[in-house]
Amino acid sequence: MADQNRVFQILVENNSGVLSRISGLFARRGYNIESITAGVTADPRVTRITVVTTGDSDIIEQIEKQVSKLVDVIDIHELKPEESVYRELAMIKVRATADQRQNVIALANIFRGSIIDVSPESLMIEVTGGTSKIDAFLGLLSGYEILELARTGVAGLGRGTRNVIYLD
């Protein structure tokens, strides 16, 4: 099977250095990280880390085994596309003259984006959705000068309650 993007959800104890240990494991083993996000969960003792990586089935299996052995890791499992919801946030600052502004706003509206800042020379747009939606929006902005771009990386959760981890 060819290399594919895979999304892992990793629950870890909220201790200093845990994110560094996980990213270090990827670096030492030569595994690529497409994106990585981390944030505290409903339980402040636990952090959810979402990692998007690429590899064949053997590499994916090794990643899962190696990460699960790390200190502070509570759980790791793959978030499969058909069983999960993925989202990403992008903030895009676009150079826009007064004449261009309405066209950029119209594009943002098509993608349910929000104009979050306006200056005489630029607009800042916030777009949330799947990675393909963000990529498509950026493609439509190719005729404009993108001054700055910030993307959060993928965050994801499994659908339903099947893979919910209950902690004591």
Image (cartoon, rainbow, N blue to C red):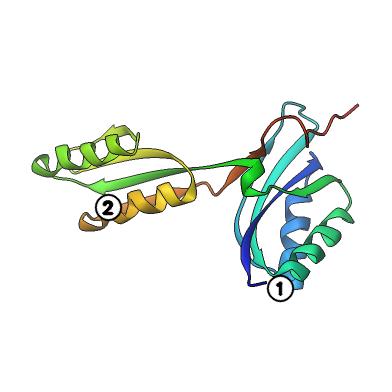
Amino acid under disc 2: Leu
Residue 112 horizontal/vertical position (percent): 35, 34
Count of picture labels: 2
Residue occupying image coordinates x 15% and y 37%: 102
Considering depth in this image, is 52 or 80 the residue closer to the camera? 80
Q: Secondary structure at mark 2?
A: helix
Residue 33 horizontal/vertical position (percent): 63, 62
Quadrant housing residue 53: bottom right
Q: Secondary structure at mark 1?
A: loop
Picture quarter with the C terminus? top right
Residue 134 horizontal/vertical position (percent): 41, 48
**To which residue does mark 1 refer?**
30
Amino acid under disc 1: Gly
157 shown above or below 167: below
Q: Residue furthest left?
A: 99
Label 1 neighbour load within 10 Å: few <14, some 14-19, many 20+: few
Residue 17 horizontal/vertical position (percent): 77, 50
Q: Which mark is residue 94?
A: none
Label 2 to label 1, Cα distance in Å?
34 Å
**To which residue does mark 2 refer?**
140
Residue occupying image coordinates x 22% and y 43%: 122
Label 2 neighbour load within 10 Å: few <14, some 14-19, many 20+: few
Q: Is residue 154 left or right of residue 58?
A: left
Q: Is residue 72 visible?
A: yes
Quadrant housing residue 74: top right
98 shown above or below 80: above
Between disc 2 and disc 1, whose residue precedes? 1
